[in-house]
């Protein structure tokens, strides 16, 4: 007797820097969601499509939930909660090393108030002893009774296979929504912009990466099978533009070179990447800029 076909959405939510993107990439087995040591790297929903037996698991990586200040921030937090609301199952991912902060308790309370299926997942458990984990698990379940609790290390893979098997069994019966060999529904243009933005996070400091966004202006297939990508980096301040370009253009060349290598691996073809840096004060308050990076704009 064959197993029934299953398909469902599992949204990964939590505070910034809990390791949501690392977990999604580990589960899918491919670099889909950009990762950096800095908080609030993910800005828009990223869908990872994962096959496990007859189950298609649609993993949704969401922006970290934090106290928003800018229009961009509000759209990011709204995207996270929308991802949870639309999912069949919500995974609250908690950084075990940081622990159950007041902010994490607020997120758990809101998940509980929604009355939907939710699991508790502690990440980075390789850095914390069992004696410290048990009180945190009890505290979270006192706030919201979670169906299941898992302990993983997204960085080294500990516990991830157990979580994966449980996710497959938890998906509702139904037909697959995407081709089984797809990895994501993200358009190549947006993927290219995100890979460039990842390098900005890795190669610039302090407020510079938060004041920048990347838009793919053109994505052109060439006759030889390669692709030409032209992208614009918008920065909020003139000082940020100088930092982004670097002395004699050194930093922008480094950003472009690293992004080009990653894109060539992801797209499985030669990539010609051309970057342009423009100052655009207030871009993070512009609806058009938010839509360009995959966020739904919010009413004023």
Image (tube, helix red, strand yellow):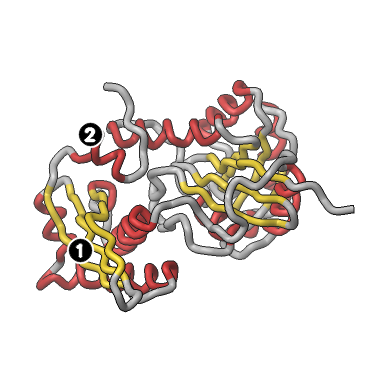
Seen from the viewer's position, the closer of residues 242 and 268 is 268
Examine the rendered structure and indicate whether residue 233 appears above or below residue 284.
below
Label 2, secondary structure: give it: helix
Tell me residue 75's x, y (percent). 36, 33
In space, the residues marked 2 and 1 are separated at their CA atoms by 23 Å
- The answer to whether residue 201 shows anywhere in this view is no
In the image, residue 234 lies at what x, y percent? 19, 50
238 or 295: nearer the viewer:
295
Residue lying at 39% horizontally and 74% vertically, measured from the top left: 269
Tell which of 147 and 129 is nearer to you: 147
Does label 2 or label 1 sit earlier along the sequence?
A: 1
Q: Which residue is mark 2?
A: 285
Q: Classify mark 1: helix, strand or loop.
A: strand
Locate residue 263 relative to residue 162 in the image: left or right.
left
**Residue at 64 percent of width and 54 percent of height:** 125
- Rendered view: 171 above or below 257: above
Residue at far bottom of view? 224
Q: Label 1 crowding class (10 Å Cα cut-off): few <14, some 14-19, many 20+?
A: some
Image check: 215 left or right of 89?
left
Residue 279 left/right relative to 23: left
The residue to which callout 1 is attached is 275
Quadrant into which the C terminus falls = top left
Which residue is painted at 57% across and 62% down in the image?
155
């Amino acid at each position: 007797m064959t197993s029934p076909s299953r398909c469902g959405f599992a949204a990964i939510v939590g505070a910034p820097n809990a390791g949501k993107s690392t977990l999604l990439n580990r589960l899918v087995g491919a670099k889909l969601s950009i990762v950096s040591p800095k908080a609030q790297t993910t800005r828009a929903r990223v869908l990872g499509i994962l096959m496990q037996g007859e189950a298609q698991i649609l993993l949704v990586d969401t922006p970290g939930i934090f106290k928003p200040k800018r229009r961009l921030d509000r759209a990011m937090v709204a995207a996270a909660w929308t991802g949870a609301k639309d999912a069949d199952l919500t995974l609250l991912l908690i950084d075990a090393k940081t622990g159950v902060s007041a902010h994490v308790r607020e997120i758990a309370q809101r998940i509980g108030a929604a009355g939907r299926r939710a699991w508790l997942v502690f990440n980075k458990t390789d850095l914390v002893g069992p004696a410290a984990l048990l009180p945190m698990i009890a505290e979270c379940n006192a706030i919201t009774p979670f169906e299941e609790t898992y302990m993983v290390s997204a960085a080294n893979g500990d516990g991830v296979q157990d979580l994966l098997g449980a996710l497959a069994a938890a998906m509702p019966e139904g037909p697959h929504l995407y081709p089984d060999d797809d990895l994501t529904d993200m358009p190549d243009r947006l993927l290219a912009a995100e890979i460039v933005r990842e390098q900005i996070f890795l190669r610039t400091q302090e407020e510079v990466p938060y004041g920048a966004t990347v838009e793919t202006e053109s994505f052109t297939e060439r006759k030889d099978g390669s692709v030409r990508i032209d992208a614009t980096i918008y920065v909020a301040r003139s000082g940020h533009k100088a930092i982004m370009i670097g002395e004699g253009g050194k930093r922008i060349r480094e950003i472009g070179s690293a992004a080009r290598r990653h894109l060539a691996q992801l797209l499985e073809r030669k990539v010609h990447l051309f970057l342009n840096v423009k100052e655009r004060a207030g871009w993070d308050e512009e609806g058009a800029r938010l839509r360009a990076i995959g966020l739904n704009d919010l009413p004023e």
